[in-house]
Image (tube, helix red, strand yellow):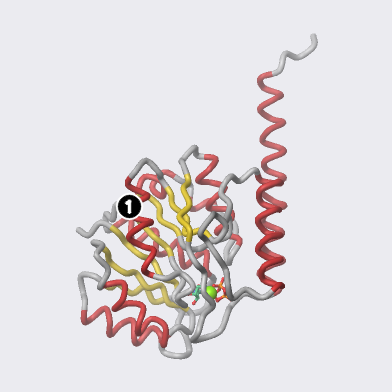
């Protein structure tokens, strides 16, 4: 069995996976690719099926019926990767914002005592050169929010370029994750940190997509906000419960 599974969720990414998959297979890393496609109207699924037929041991396709969201796409990929005994499980976008050249470094970092590695835009050396002001503000706001309200330690809390050691995913209550869409990434990080796993960050330059369209919408942003507030409430309630149990009650 190969060491590393790279999960690539896709929705209308045909042009991108045509070049991404061969690039991934050429990396000097023992890896397989798991494409989770949501019946993309542009035929991404058909191309993924062809790639899988050409490399049956290294390219797998999970084809879903319709656009079911990014969070459940990751979950479907996690389940497949755990069932197939991969030791390391990565997630990345199909649009080259997460460039394959960073994968060897992320895999290496996960070998040296770090349980989960983020390809990070917000550590020294990481950059988002193409981001317009609006995206910079959004990203800054999201991180400021998750750091203060949730106490998350990672600098880049919304990055989807990640590498998990198998034991992280196999020990987390993945079924309990409530959010779908982009806020799934925040909730995952919250679970990983609260389970006590170390999280490392490797700098990446995040480049804008050339082919295809972004799927981030105002609705996704509102949902992410809701997720942070929901987890914040859990954090506050959880804390007070611990204090109560440990406290000496006045008789
Ligand atoms: N299977 C599946 N994939 C999705 C879904 N929504 C987004 N994706 C994929 O998730 C990845 C990230 O989506 P993008 O639209 O690039 O979002 P983003 O990278 O956060 O935003 P941009 O920087 O604007 O590109 C891409 O590979 C998308 O094709 C979905 O509902 N289902
Ligand atoms: Mg993108």
Q: What percent of the width, then of the height, locates residue 72? A: 50, 65
Q: Residue furthest right?
A: 250
Q: Residue furthest top?
A: 251
Residue neighbourhood size for the residue with mark 1, other residues' Cα within 10 Å, grouped as few (<14), some (14–19), many (≥20) = few
100 to the left or right of 245: left
Quick check: 87 above or below 207?
above
Quick check: 147 above or below 106?
above
Q: Residue furthest bottom?
A: 42
Quick check: 92 above or below 142?
below
Q: Quadrant of the C terminus?
A: top right
Q: Quadrant of the N terminus?
A: bottom left
Residue at point 32%, 47% (across, down): 111
240 to the left or right of 184: right
Q: What percent of the width, then of the height, locates residue 77? A: 39, 64
Q: What percent of the width, then of the height, locates residue 242? A: 66, 27
58 to the left or right of 210: left
The residue identified by callout 1 is 108
147 to the left or right of 166: right
Element type at mark 1: helix
Judge by depth and name the residue closer to the eye, 243 or 146: 146
Residue at point 33%, 81% (across, down): 48
Residue at point 33%, 52% (across, down): 108
Q: Quadrant of residue 23?
A: bottom left
Quick check: 16 above or below 197?
below
Q: What percent of the width, then of the height, locates residue 194? A: 54, 40
Residue at point 26%, 78% (across, down): 52
Judge by depth and name the residue closer to the eye, 232 or 31: 31
Q: Quadrant of residue 243?
A: top right
């Amino acid at each position: 069995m190969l060491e590393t599974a790279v999960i690539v969720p896709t929705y209308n990414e045909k042009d991108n996976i045509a070049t991404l998959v061969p690039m991934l297979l050429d990396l000097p890393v023992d890896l397989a690719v798991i494409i989770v496609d949501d019946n993309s109207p542009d035929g991404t699924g058909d191309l993924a099926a062809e790639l899988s037929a050409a490399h049956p041991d290294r390219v797998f396709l999970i084809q879903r019926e319709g656009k079911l969201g990014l969070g459940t796409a990751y979950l479907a990929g996690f389940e497949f990767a755990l069932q197939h005994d991969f030791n390391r499980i990565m997630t990345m976008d199909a649009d080259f914002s997460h460039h394959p050249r960073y994968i060897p470094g992320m895999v290496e970092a996960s070998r040296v005592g770090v349980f989960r590695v983020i390809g990070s835009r917000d550590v020294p050396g990481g950059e988002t050169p193409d981001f317009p002001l609006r995206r910079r503000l959004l990203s800054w706001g999201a991180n400021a929010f998750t750091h203060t309200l949730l106490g998350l330690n990672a600098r880049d809390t919304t990055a989807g370029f990640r590498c998990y050691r198998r034991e992280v995913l196999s020990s987390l209550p993945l079924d309990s994750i409530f959010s779908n869409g982009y806020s799934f990434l925040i909730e995952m990080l919250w679970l990983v940190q609260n389970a006590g796993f170390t999280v490392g960050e490797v700098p990446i330059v995040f480049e804008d997509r050339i082919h295809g369209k972004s799927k981030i919408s105002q609705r996704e942003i509102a949902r992410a906000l809701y997720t942070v507030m929901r987890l914040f409430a859990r954090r506050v309630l959880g804390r007070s419960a611990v204090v109560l149990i440990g406290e000496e009650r006045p008789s």
